[in-house]
Image (spheres, helix red, strand yellow):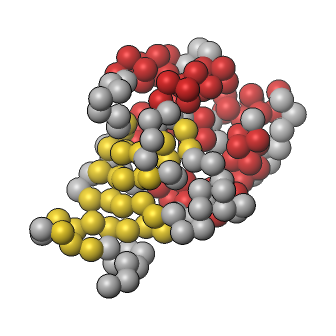
Amino acid sequence: RILRENKGLEIEGEKIEAFHTPGHTKDSLCFYTGNALISGDTLFNGTVGNCFSGDPDGFFKSVKMLMTFPDETVIYAGHDYVKASMMFAKTLEPDNKDIDIFLEKYDSGHVCSVLLDEKKVNPYLRFNDEKMTALLRKRRLQVETEEDRWNSLMSI
């Protein structure tokens, strides 16, 4: 059976929705069930994947779509890059106390996060945040549109 976006599948009575999230690769998928998002290499805890697809606009749309999930969604990423991504986030926002809290909650044996926390600490989800926009302006990067800010963040 072919897996189609928004059709999903059912395993032992549990419905799992599939979402096409091009960006990391052209055929990237994320899965949502209950309040859990299995984000693979699209969205990591504290960062996003590399854009191997060569389609940053598609990647932006994928990440923006994932941001519409409920704030209490638990994110299970494909890899654990928490420490490195939070070190990077701290270089951008040294006064962001939410990053410190995020790191305090980090457990390498159980790596997951909640979307609301990601929106507070993940630089790539903060493209509409005034502080992030000011930082991009200071670096003389493009900030006119959401896509500009996303691409500017991805270029850092």
How far across and how far down the image is residue 88, in percent? 62, 25
Q: Is residue 121 above or below residue 18?
A: above
Q: Please give left or right for residue 12 compared with residue 17 in the image.
A: left
Q: Is residue 118 above or below residue 63?
A: above
Residue 136 point in image, percent of width and height: 77, 33
Image quadrant where residue 5 sits: bottom left
Residue found at the very far right of the displayed protein? 140
Residue shown at the point (41%, 45%) measured from the top left? 77
**Nearest the eye: 74 or 78:** 78
The residue located at (75%, 29%) in the rendering is: 134
Left or right of 1? Residue 151 is right
Residue 113 in view in this figure? yes
- The quarter of the image holding the C terminus is top right
Q: Residue furthest bottom?
A: 1
Rendered location of residue 117, percent (x, y): 42, 33
Above-or-below relation of 23 to 9: above
Residue 70 is situated, as x and y percent measured from the top left of the image, at 35, 50
* Residue in the image at 59% along x and 14% along y: 95
User: Is residue 61 at least partly visible in the picture?
Assistant: no
Q: In percent of the image, x 27 and y 74: which residue is there?
A: 9
